[in-house]
C-alpha cells in the first residue's frame, strides 16, 4: 500500500508512474488527496479542542487552589461542553475509512527500470541460457508422455474434483516429491530458513500481501470461516512477520516454503491450458526476503541469479524477462519472469517470477525495523518462485524424452533414486 503523505507530496509523479502500469483510475489520486485534506483539517480542529481541554483542566486546578471555586466550576462546564463536542468521532472515522478504501485500490508504483508497454509481447528479454533440444520425429507433448508412462491421471482428477486438479501417481508422484525436496535443499543451502505454513489464511493475511481486494475473484474462499486457500506460499510466509519490529542486525530475513497453491484461473481455455500448462491446484516452492530498503534492488538481482542457477542445474533452456508496466502484478515495483522452453510444444512456459515489492506489502502488514539510530522504518519485501512444478515437469518430460525413456537431469537423480523414467 502506498503512503498518503508521499501521494500528497508527489501527486504528479504518482500519476505518471501509475500510468506506466496502465492504471485507468488516476482520478482516485485527486479524490484521495481531497479526502485526506478534509481529514487533516478535522483532525487539526480536534487537536485544537483537545489543547483547549488540556489548558482548561490545568487552569481549573489553579483556580481551585486559589479558592476561586465559582470560576473553576464555570470552566468545568465549558470543558464538559467541549468534550461532548469531541465525542462525535463519526465524521473523522468516515473520512479515514474513505481514504483507506481508495488507498487499497492503488497498485504499487513501478520502478524506473520497468519497460513501457501494455502486453507480454512488450516485455524485455534480459538474457537466455541453455540449449534447446532437438527432438526426434514423433516427439510427444507432456500430456501424452504422462499417459504413456502412467505418471499423471487428469481424468481421475476431474472425477474426484474437477478440471485442473490432476492426480499424480507412481513415478509421477515420486518426481513431484523429488523436485520439492531438491528445491528446498537448494534454498536452505543458500541460507533460507524452511517453513511449512498453513495452506489457508485469514482475511488480514490475504490483505497484507495484496491479494485482497485485488485478486479476490481468483482465490478459493471458505466462507463459513472466512478463510482463503492460498494462491502461493508468499501469503502465509510473509505474514509471519506481520506487526513485528525487527532490529537491523536481524536482516535480511530469508524464508522458503513448499505449499500447494490454489487458483481459479477463470477464463482460461484451449491449447494453452492443456495438461500441466495451467492448473487450479499445483505445487510450488517459494523464497521470500525481508530486507533493508537500501539493499532491496541488490537482493533482487541476487534472487534472480539464485533462480537462474537452479534452472541451469535442471539443464533446461530458459530466458529471463523484465516485465513491462502493463504486464506487472498489482503489488510489484519490478518483476523478472523466468520461462523455460518446451520443445514438444515449441513454446516458452513461465515457471517463476521474482519481484521487489519495496514497502508496498510491509506498509500493509506493518513490518518494520529499527535502524542503528533507533528510528523505525518499513522494510522491503521480495519473493520468487523457486520453483513452480507443473511447467517445470512438462519441460523436463518433453525435453528429455528418448526412445529408452525420459532421462532426468543429474541434480534430480539422487532425489528421485534413479536416472530414468521408463
Image (cartoon, grey):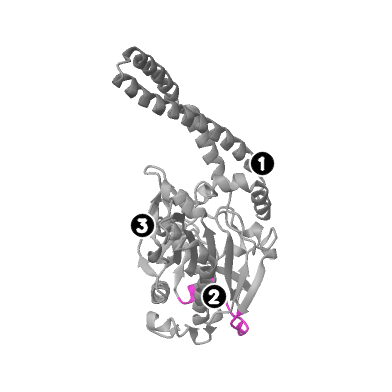
Image location of residue 69, percent across then percent down: 31, 14
Question: 113 and 390: which one is in front?
Answer: 113
- Identify the secondary structure beneath mark 2: helix
Residue positioned 40% across, 55% down in the render: 239
Label 2 packing within 10 angstroms: few (<14), some (14-19), many (20+): many
Question: 33 and 348: which one is in front?
Answer: 33
Q: Which numbered marker is on residue 395?
A: 2
The verdict on residue 134 being magenta is yes
Residue positioned 35% across, 64% down in the render: 195
Residue positioned 41% across, 27% down in the render: 55
- Identify the secondary structure beneath mark 3: loop
Q: Quadrant of residue 175?
A: bottom left
Callout 1 touching callout 3 (CB < 8 Å): no
Residue ID for mark 1: 27
First-in-chain label (1 vs 3): 1
The mark closer to the camera, 3 or 2, is 3
Residue positioned 65% across, 46% down in the render: 11
In the image: residue 239, left or right of residue 65: right
- Identify the secondary structure beneath mark 1: helix
Residue ID for mark 3: 198
Q: Quadrant of the C terminus?
A: bottom left
- The residues colored magenta run 129-149
Callout 1 touching callout 2 (CB < 8 Å): no
Amino acid at each position: 500500500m502506498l503512503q498518503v503523505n508521499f501521494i500528497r507530496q508527489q501527486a504528479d509523479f504518482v500519476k505518471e508512474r501509475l500510468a506506466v502500469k496502465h492504471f485507468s483510475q488516476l482520478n482516485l489520486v485527486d479524490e484521495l488527496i481531497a479526502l485526506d485534506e478534509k481529514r487533516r483539517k478535522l483532525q487539526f480542529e480536534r487537536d485544537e479542542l483537545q489543547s483547549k481541554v488540556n489548558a482548561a483542566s490545568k487552569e481549573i486546578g489553579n483556580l481551585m487552589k486559589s479558592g476561586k471555586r465559582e470560576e473553576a466550576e464555570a470552566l468545568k462546564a465549558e470543558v464538559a461542553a467541549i468534550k461532548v463536542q469531541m465525542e462525535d468521532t463519526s465524521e473523522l472515522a468516515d473520512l479515514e475509512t474513505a481514504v483507506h478504501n481508495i488507498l487499497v485500490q492503488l497498485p504499487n508504483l513501478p520502478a524506473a527500470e520497468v519497460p513501457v508497454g501494455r502486453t507480454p509481447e512488450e516485455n524485455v528479454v534480459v538474457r537466455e541460457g541453455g540449449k534447446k533440444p532437438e527432438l526426434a520425429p514423433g516427439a510427444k507433448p507432456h500430456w501424452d508422455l504422462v499417459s504413456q508412462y502412467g505418471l499423471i491421471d487428469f481424468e481421475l482428477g476431474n472425477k474426484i474434483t474437477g478440471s485442473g486438479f490432476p492426480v499424480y501417481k507412481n513415478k509421477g508422484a515420486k518426481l513431484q516429491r523429488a523436485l520439492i525436496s531438491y528445491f528446498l535443499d537448494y534454498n536452505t543451502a543458500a541460507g533460507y530458513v524452511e517453513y511449512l505454513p498453513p495452506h489457508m489464511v485469514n482475511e488480514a493475511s490475504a490483505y497484507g500481501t495484496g491479494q485482497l481486494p485485488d485478486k479476490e475473484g481468483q482465490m478459493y474462499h471458505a466462507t463459513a470461516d472466512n478463510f482463503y486457500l492460498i494462491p502461493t506460499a508468499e501469503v502465509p510466509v510473509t505474514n509471519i512477520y506481520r506487526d513485528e519490529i525487527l532490529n537491523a542486525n536481524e536482516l535480511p530475513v530469508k524464508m522458503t516454503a513448499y505449499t500447494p497453491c490454489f487458483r481459479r484461473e477463470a477464463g482460461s481455455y484451449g491449447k494453452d491450458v492443456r495438461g500441466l500448462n495451467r492448473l487450479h491446484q499445483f505445487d510450488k516452492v517459494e523464497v521470500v526476503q525481508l530486507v533493508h530498503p537500501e539493499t532491496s534492488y541488490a537482493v533482487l538481482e541476487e534472487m534472480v541469479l539464485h533462480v537462474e542457477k537452479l534452472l541451469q542445474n535442471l539443464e533446461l533452456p530458459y530466458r529471463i524477462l523484465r516485465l513491462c508496466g502493463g504486464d506487472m502484478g498489482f503489488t510489484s515495483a519490478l518483476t523478472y519472469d523466468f520461462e523455460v522452453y518446451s520443445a514438444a510444444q515449441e513454446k516458452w512456459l513461465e515457471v517463476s517470477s521474482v519481484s521487489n515489492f519495496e514497502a508496498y506489502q510491509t506498509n500493509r502488514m506493518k513490518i518494520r525495523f529499527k535502524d542503528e539510530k533507533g528510528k523505525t522504518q518499513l522494510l522491503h519485501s521480495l519473493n520468487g518462485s523457486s520453483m513452480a512444478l507443473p511447467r517445470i515437469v512438462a519441460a523436463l518430460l518433453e525435453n528429455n524424452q528418448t526412445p529408452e525413456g525420459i532421462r532426468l537431469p543429474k541434480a534430480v537423480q539422487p532425489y528421485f533414486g534413479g536416472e530414468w523414467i521408463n
